Amino acid sequence: MSFQFDAQVQSILSACAEMGNVRSICSGPVSTAEFTFEPLSQMNRNTANFNNASNAIEALKDSPDALRICSHILEHAEDPTTIFFIANVTKDVIIRHYSSFSLQTLVALRGELMTDLLSPRFRNPSFKAEVINSAISKMAQAIAVIVKRTWLEDAIQEDRKHFFVNLEGLRRSGNLFNKTIALTVLDQMLGEFSSEATAFGLPWDFHSACRKSFEETELPRLFHMTMESLHEYILNSSLLQDKGELTCSRKCVAIAVKIMNWEFVSLGNVLAGSFAKLEKPESADGSGRFPSSWTPALVRPEIVETVFKIHDILLPYDISGNSAKLILYLAAVNGPVFPDFATQSGFITFFLERLENLITNFHNSTTHAQTNSMRDASGDELIAISSIIKRVLSTHSLNSLSPIAGFFKFMSSVVRHTLFSIDCMKSALSLGVDENSPGMIATDVMLEMWAQFGDQATSAIQMAPAGDAFTSTLTNFVQTLSLPIFTSHLEMRLALAERQVLDEADFEDEMGMEDEVAYADQLDHLTIIARWDAEGCLRLLHGLIQEAVNGIQGVLGGQAGEGASQTRQVLLERVHWLVLISEHVLADAADGEVPMVPETLMAVSSKAASAEADIVVAVSSLIFQILSVFSNVEPGSPMMEFCSPLIVETLFVFLNRWSRTYLFINPSDYGQMSPWLVASYSAHGGGGQLFDFMLLSAKQNFALWRSEESVLNAVIGLLQSFAVRGVARDRMIQSGHFQELVGAFVSNIKDMPTSTHSPMIRVLASVSTQGSNPEVEANYFNELTGMLKTRLNSVVLRPDFARIFQSAPIKNEVVNVLEMYEGLCLAADYNTAGTIFNCLIPYLDSFGKLFKVYKNITEVNLYVLRVFCEISKMLGLHEAAFEERRTFYAAYTGVLKVYSNTNIGVRSIAMLDEEDRLDDLSCVLETLSNLILVESKDEDRDDVVFFGVNMVLPLITNEMIQYPSISQKALELVGNVVRHFPSKLLDLDIEELDKIMGVLRLGTTESFVIEVQKLSFEAIIGVVRYCVLAVRKGENDIQAIYPSMDITLQHLLDYMLFKEFDPDLIESVGEALYMLVLLRHDSYTVLAKQLLESQPTQERRVRLEAAFRTLTGCIEVAAVAGQASGNAVLSFSEYKLYSEGLLKFLMEVRGFLRIR
């Protein structure tokens, strides 16, 4: 060994020693951990020395002798930390300088690394096991990288086969250490051939070809090897008493899990980082599909048997739950691996038998209390079994399951497991365990499973021929299980409600309409289950609600007894949940259309002997009775202490959902119609009387809870739903109760929460502008606008306003008035925009003066900006008179001048709370976009738009672009300017145009929202396309814009070649590049040349040059076609040709350009 070589080795060893003066931090299980290293402390190391050591190790990767130095150190080093660092360097050297080494050298290196791995130094007890395991994993990764990188080399195919044979020999050797090493290497091999592969800087085609070959040749053998290893532990479970064998068994299971979750290239899956977008596989999460070549290896009873048995054996030791995951992925097996229906049916039959045994054994050996113990694995097993059941029933359709003889026997065990899970949750409640117990998690999983199964069952029953035996049995089955599951879940939910009260939790915080959101999925799933036996479940609800009504009457009668306060709270919590669940069972949510009465409920109602016997009507009536009780309590009476505003809120949310389906029900909308629903709720039946009751209740609770924001918003929500329905709106405007409610609102508005002002004004404006009685409407509207005018003038016309405008009461009053004007604006639509716009015109000057007075007070000027924003929308809905438009444009120009002069929009992000993320700037951007879209082309409109654009865009910073509220609206504004004023864009001062392009460039990279990035690229494309056409027509001299275009082109090339970006952006990126190259071809050539000259090796320069040549050819071919079309826009076929060339270019060069 030469002196120079020896000095290099010593230098690297010293660097490793300095880097090794750290403590290892494990980031995962010891057997598979990857370690990072952190300094012990500043006292224990010198920062400069540490940095020098890190730089020395990094520099080694580009040394001509790197591989020889690494091999020497790995052969002789004893310290596992040194081995870790040097193995990592070896891996990177192979990736960077692969072409510098002969195949023989790499094959020899692979053998040396295997020899080093098997050396006794890795059994040295003086080193920590986790550090040794980290070094072993890193060396195994280096071996896997060599195997992957040389995979497509034909000359060493036989050698590679021998390598895998030798690994199998090590596994079978009987030597525990050798077996561990073999499994570690195989585990790393799976990682390198999966979507988690190390970046090699090679085209995607290389990774795809390697992975496809690996899948076809080695992966099935590796699966067989793993199953064989697991079978050995089944035959001799005493081996697991040895800690090393236990570790090996876990590693085998982890390898099997990776294989079972493999996504096969041959089935259309693509590697992460590619730019291909293929359809997702059929399975829900993209896993479980196996090709037909795997049928002999996977679709065998002994495989299923092995997986279930190893789970049973490892359960006491399996902390990570991997053996349960193995069953889970086996449950998801689908696709071409099943050549015919019989094969699939046989596999599922055997799997369900073993799963049923697992369920039964678990129930027989486990108590409910055990699942809640932290020292017992039963809770994890409960969740795992629930997930496996859900997966197998969601993977395989009922068509596949119907021929199985024991299917309903298996499903009965699933019912038992569901009830067992709910009982585990009840046990958790009795033991005081947290709500997120295993029982609760398992219950949620099973609830979702039954909902999915119910949807499948409903479809199967509807499509089955008459007299079909399976669907007949299926119908009886789901109807039979519905009530027990619904009952048990309802009991659990009510027990949980009682537990919350008994634990003296903050009742006001725990209960409330957040439950509607937090438990939305569970409520929807429970609804599906309830409707299988709608009559039985509704009767259960009716009985429980009747008990609650009796309890309420008892409390109101003073019969609560001892612990009255707690009893009342329990009762209220029960009422809350019963009403909430009834709301979902009785009616569906409104998703844009009026929800119909569910078919099962219509059938139940139709067969009732009378309206009194109709359980749908009966449950609804009981809830109306509860509302009546709470609405008729006298303010200030002792009973007010019992009344809960949150219960009232729940009741009005119920009314809102229920009334959309049932109130004023129209028989002509249904094929089958219950006469009792018509009699009770139609416009010609009891609907009018019920509507009056709802309005009376709304009026009463408006008075009772006028300071309770949540109640008032729920009442207003109900009124708003009436305001958009013709029959309800017309009745409401003629109702005395509604008139009294409006009077109460107007007279008490100062005492009501400010958040209720705008939505209530919106309701009043909708009712008073859209009904069928113009005279009554006009009276309402005049009363409304008169009230607003009075409120506004009472503030701005005060003689002392200039002196007291900054006082808190005056500021609050101004904000309240502006909120109400905003509510008036929000009521505008195509029919009412003209009326509302005209009534606002006289007050624009007052709004502008308020903005000037409060120019430095955000909470006031923001509301002025919001009112102007809403009015600007009306210009797009209503053809306003010219003078009225000019009045608006003049008023808004004045606002913008104040905004600009005081720099209101320029504030540091750090100064803002999360509730105030530059809302004022966002509002201005939106208003300017609204004005651009106004159809009337006025010079005044253009002037205010460009004044605003020139003023507001320079305020956009890198920080702001990260906030979607700012970035999206800024880019929409620029896009609208580009689309509607392209000629004026080029007339802008070049500095202003540069600012616009700067904002667009920021949008492509600084935003984390893909929609914002797309808007940025679209706007860039629009600007450049206009420039291209202008050059071709010779109409404009646009040379002044070229420097900005060159900066944008360089930015785009950097983005494409060196940055991470979403594959969904490839089309936008490609079109922007195409347009920029058309406009600035010479600059493109210069930039490409600079990039070529910056490459460190001739090989990379040649490769990059060839890729650029191909890309440029594609652009030029497409450009000829685009020029022939006369508008620079490519046809689909021409763009497809170009985009394929671009995709190939990116796949070819992005990898190696992004690796140092």
Image (cartoon, rainbow, N blue to C red):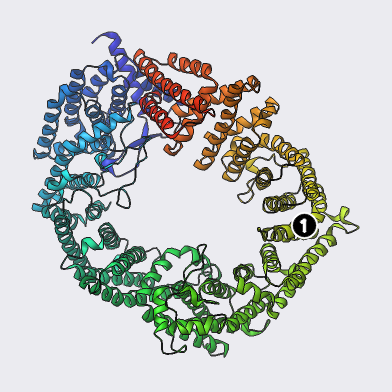
Task: Reply above or below: 711 against 1137.
Answer: below
Q: Nearer the viewer, residue 686 or 390?
A: 686
Instruction: Please state the horizontal and vertical placement of residue 822, each as a whole percent of the image.
Output: 71, 58
Instruction: Please state the horizontal and vertical placement of residue 338, each as a whole percent of the image.
Output: 18, 51
Q: Nearer the viewer, residue 955 or 407?
A: 407
Q: Nearer the viewer, residue 250 or 670?
A: 670
Q: Is residue 1055 left or right of residue 266?
A: right
Q: Is residue 745 left or right of residue 244?
A: right
Q: Quadrant of residue 987?
A: top right
Task: Reply above or below: 1092 against 301.
Answer: above
Q: Quadrant of residue 83?
A: top left
Instruction: Please state the horizontal and vertical placement of residue 297, each as a whole percent of the image.
Output: 13, 46
Image quarter (top left, top right, bottom left or bottom right) of the C terminus = top left
Q: Which residue is mark 1?
A: 838
Residue kind at label 1, given as amino acid type: Asn
Q: What residue is at 52 percent from the left and 76 percent from the top?
A: 666
Image quarter (top left, top right, bottom left or bottom right) of the N terminus = top left
Q: What residue is at 38 percent from the left and 81 percent from the top?
A: 535
